[in-house]
């Protein structure tokens, strides 16, 4: 195997696929990136943890065909520190040691034979007729806004997934961990009028968001094959398992309207929460919100450390109400609201509270309060 590649092209390719390498690999080869020559002008990089796979095509001048897997971390460190010049990779036939040179720098890196890399992830075929196209920008925006409420990745149940519901020209994305719920609707150009509901692991979509910055195209194609989802651009492919089952009917949980409503400046509330939360009890993370006439008072206290308090001006004329939250849930909701002001829909101290941007955007976050002892 021998090829010459630009440092920037190879580095971007590594950054795209390295996220799929396994953290706790039972098989050492899953810590590696597969490098394979495709034709005289292209190499392919592949990484997988068996649940999540990413491939990237990279322009290169290929002189001899071949393939090998190299340790992701070491490869990344070497390429990132090389000068911005052409890099040569060379491996003698039958060997697993790769010689990497760039100007006066030279490395010999020992890999693992490509034959040990899981073969089912190296050449994915899709039925082009079954795919549907989606613009990257609205898709990524919707996932960022509504995907944060999913349960942590360690949780293998459906709540660790993000629902993507496509119907007509509307993309609806939602997630919930049982304590909070986020939902957003985006208008898309659904040329073929596909309708689908997919439950995608949150890790898959969060990693796709990170790698989307390296994708030059305006749109990607999405395919489903049995229990897998495949997100394909011209130069990258992301493959993940889908979660199967009946996701909670979350739209039934969102109130049509709230008995009391406050209008709050988003940045003022974020700043106040971040200051007041310095004194929260780390075990509970509880901050109390006291709504009164055109005023919101935020308080936190820890018996051993002390307490904090701050008031901000708001637009509120309802009856006085004290409600407590895990402040982290409120902060995340506020930071995902694309508006200067947020409407806070209130009912009782133990009812779910609704956070919506004060504009036309179809976004809502519902947060369950904490009982005040």
Image (tube, rainbow, N blue to C red):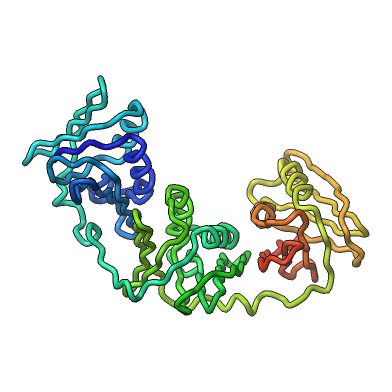
Q: Residue at x 50, y 73 (%)?
A: 190
Q: Image point 67% across, 68% down: which residue? A: 362
Residue shown at the point (57%, 66%) measured from the top left: 176
Residue 82: give x, y in percent of width and height.
33, 27
The answer to whether residue 328 is above or below residue 87 is: below
Instruction: Give coordinates of residue 294: x percent, y percent.
Output: 91, 57
Q: Quadrant of the C terminus?
A: bottom right
Classify residue 150 as left or right of residue 66: right
Residue sitting farthest toward the left:
94
Q: Position of residue 91 (x, y in %)?
A: 13, 36
Task: From the viewer's perspective, tell me whether residue 293 is left or right of residue 347.
Answer: right
Which residue appears at 67% of the width and 50% of the height? 285
- Return the residue nearer the eye: 286 or 217: 217
| Depth order, front residue of 288/190 | 190
Q: Is residue 63 above or below residue 253?
A: above
Looking at the picture, tell me which residue is in the foreground, 185 or 243: 185
């Amino acid at each position: 195997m021998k090829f010459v590649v630009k440092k920037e092209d190879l580095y971007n390719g590594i950054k795209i696929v390295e996220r799929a390498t396994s953290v706790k690999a039972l098989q050492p080869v899953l810590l590696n990136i597969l490098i394979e020559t495709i034709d005289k002008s292209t190499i392919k990089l592949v990484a997988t943890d068996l649940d999540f796979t990413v491939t990237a095509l990279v322009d290169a001048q290929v002189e001899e065909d071949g393939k090998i897997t190299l340790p992701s971390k070491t490869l990344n460190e070497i390429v990132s520190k090389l000068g911005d010049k052409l890099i040569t990779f060379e491996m003698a036939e039958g060997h697993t040691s790769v010689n990497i040179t760039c100007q006066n720098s030279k490395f010999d890196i020992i890999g693992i034979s490509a034959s040990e890399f899981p073969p089912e992830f190296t050449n994915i075929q899709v039925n082009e007729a079954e795919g549907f196209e989606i613009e990257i920008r609205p898709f990524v925006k919707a996932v960022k806004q509504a995907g944060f409420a999913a349960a942590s990745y360690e949780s293998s149940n459906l709540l660790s997934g993000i629902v993507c519901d496509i119907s007509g020209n509307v993309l609806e994305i939602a997630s919930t961990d049982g304590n909070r719920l986020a939902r957003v609707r985006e208008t898309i150009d659904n040329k073929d009028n596909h309708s689908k509901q997919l439950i995608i692991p949150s890790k898959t979509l969060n990693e796709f968001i990170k790698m989307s910055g390296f994708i030059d195209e305006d749109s990607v194609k999405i395919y489903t094959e049995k229990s897998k989802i495949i997100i394909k651009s011209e130069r990258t492919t992301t493959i993940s398992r889908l979660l199967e089952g009946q996701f909670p009917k979350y739209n039934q949980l969102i109130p049509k309207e709230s008995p009391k409503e406050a209008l709050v400046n988003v940045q003022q509330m974020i700043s106040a929460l971040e200051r007041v939360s310095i004194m929260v009890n780390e075990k509970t993370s509880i901050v109390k919100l006291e709504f009164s006439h055109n005023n919101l008072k935020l308080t936190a206290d820890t018996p051993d450390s002390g307490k904090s308090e701050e008031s901000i001006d708001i637009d509120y004329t309802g009856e006085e109400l004290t409600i407590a939250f895990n402040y982290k849930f409120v902060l995340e909701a506020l930071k995902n609201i694309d508006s200067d002001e947020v409407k806070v829909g209130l009912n009782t101290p133990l009812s779910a509270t609704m956070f919506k941007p004060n504009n036309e955007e179809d976004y809502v976050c519902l947060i369950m309060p904490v009982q005040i002892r």
